[in-house]
Amino acid sequence: MTHAIPIRPPRHASVLGLVLLLAALALVGAPARAADGAARLDGYLDGLTTLQADFHQVTFNSDRTQMLESDGRLYLERPGRFRWEYRTPFAQVIIADGKRVYVHDLELEQVYHRSQQAALRGTPALLLTQDEPIEDLFVVTPMEEGGERDWVALRPRDPDTEIERIEIGFDGEQLDTLLMFDRFGQVTHLRFADIRRNQPLEDDLFRFDHSTGGDFLEFD
């Protein structure tokens, strides 16, 4: 079983949850109708270079009791770099620089890090870091309409991932809602705002400052 970088609970969900969201955001604007969903998603990703957005995240446990609610901002640059900033309820920064993933808990003064290849294995973040067609990595299927939204489901083909599936809801051509289901019964609900596609981003966003004080823990 592949495991995410450990993040001291109950502050935030696993890094796998993070990268799932990043990958799903990369699909913003992709039409969700029709059976050729995989081809449409591939076409959209072909033109994606950078993305930034505010996020609101709510995580529920297996009995659907709310565990955590958080807000922040994300930045990504293809291929393979992203920055995830939790602002509330705890300050935390997660950076992927193309080789390693760093999780910096500012309040606990701790940094966890792991190779990016190991941290992202089996997750939809592979959409951002590999050139394989989406259908080689995931089973992509349209779902029945729910309310005013169209839905697409992605299931990882890798049997050793902690992720069971994600469901992406579109209002027209705009991504509106994302649900992530893991093998422990947890569900993460995500909404997005102030989405900016293909705008220049500073390199410093994706560089971890190794002079940061506190505990520095490696998990390879």
Image: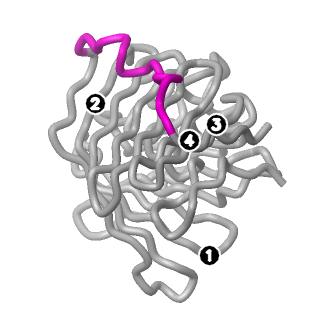
What secondary structure do most residues of the magenta stretch adopt? Answer: loop
Q: Secondary structure at mark 4?
A: strand
Graded by Cα atoms within 10 Å as few (under 14), some (14 to 19) or many (20 or more), the crowding at tag 2 reads many
What residue lies at 56% left-to-right and 41% top-to-bottom? Answer: 111
Q: Position of residue 175 (x, y in %)?
A: 29, 45
Residues marked 4 and 3 touching at CB (< 8 Å): yes
Judge whether 214 appears above or below 80 on screen: below
Q: Inspect the magenta stretch and tell me whether residue 197 lies in it.
A: no
Name the mark nearer the viewer: 1 or 4.
4
Q: Nearer the viewer, residue 50 or 117?
A: 117
Q: Nearer the viewer, residue 32 or 5?
A: 5
Q: Nearer the viewer, residue 189 or 32?
A: 189
Which of marks 4 and 1 precedes in the sequence?
A: 4
What residue lies at 34% left-to-right and 51% top-to-bottom? Answer: 91
Q: Position of residue 63 (x, y in %)?
A: 53, 88
Q: Is residue 99 left or right of residue 106?
A: right
Judge whether 203 appears above or below 169 on screen: above
Q: Which residue is mark 4?
A: 111
Q: Which mark is residue 52?
A: 2
Q: Which residue is mark 3?
A: 113
Name the mark nearer the viewer: 1 or 3.
3
Name the mark nearer the viewer: 2 or 4.
4
Q: Which mark is residue 185?
A: 1
- Residue lying farthest to the front in this orientation: 213
Graded by Cα atoms within 10 Å as few (under 14), some (14 to 19) or many (20 or more), the crowding at tag 1 reads few
Q: Which residues are magenta?
A: 199-213
Q: Nearer the viewer, residue 195 or 155?
A: 195
Q: Is residue 92 left or right of residue 133?
A: left
Which of marks 2 and 3 precedes in the sequence?
A: 2
Residues marked 3 and 2 touching at CB (< 8 Å): no
